[in-house]
Image: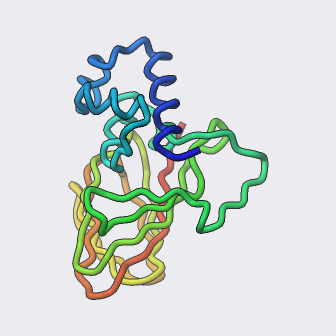
Amino acid sequence: MELGKIIAINLKELRNERNLTLGQLSKISGISKAMLSDIEKGSSNPTINTIWKIANGLNVPYTKLMEGVEKESTFVSREESVMQIGESEHYRVYCYFKNTPVRNFELFYVELDAQSSNASIGHSEKAQEYIYIIQGELTLHTEAGDYTLVEGDSLAFDSSIGHTYINQNDTMLSFIEINFYPN
């Protein structure tokens, strides 16, 4: 099933579980009622930040909106990973493992093109992000400070605050990102 349809089903289910109207969800997420309606109908492919805003409004992990049924053992090839793009096509995120009732983290492979950046809104309260640089150099700007990481470096930070991934080099940056949701 395509990602837009999965998000549509999960969004409607989560909204109904909370007895929220589209208008109420619009107020708590900052996403227009019309956009939410389009997403619920499966006629829109929301951006990463749109999904974050909805997830934060519903107080659920990001991948809860993309959740499907998983087996005990799961193999995910690069071709099977779900790709999403940021506000521009310069930032690509490939979801390998989603948050589930028995897994309180998400695993992503991320690519950021040369001389580009991507701003991310803060994730859910108490969320933590772990980054491992595979290739290139990342400048991470957060409300708490700036960090520069190169190949082989790692960083853990409070991702409930806004943060921006910046690639100031002439080569593509790639890294692994884990979003962790403490209980």
Q: Which residue is depicted at the point 73% across and 55% down? A: 74
Specify the color scheme.
rainbow
Note whether 91 is above or below 73 in the view shown: below
Q: Which residue is depicted at the point 33% across and 49% down? A: 47
Quadrant of the rendering where the C terminus is positioned? top right
Note whether 15 is above or below 99 in the view shown: above
Residue 50 picture location, percent across and down:
31, 42
Residue 176 picture location, percent across and down:
49, 68
In the orientation shown, which residue stands out farthest toward the top? 19
Quadrant of the rendering where the N terminus is positioned? top right
**Count of numbered badges drawn on the protein:** 0
Left or right of 165: which side holds 45? right
Left or right of 152: which side holds 123? left
Q: Which residue is depicted at the point 43% across and 75% down? A: 174
Note whether 80 is above or below 31 in the view shown: below
Residue 169 picture location, percent across and down:
26, 85
In the orientation shown, which residue stands out farthest toward the bottom? 170
Left or right of 115: which side holds 172? right
Quadrant of the image occupied by residue 167: bottom left
Residue 159 picture location, percent across and down:
36, 51
Q: Which residue is depicted at the point 61% across and 61% down? A: 80
In the orientation shown, which residue stands out farthest toward the right? 72
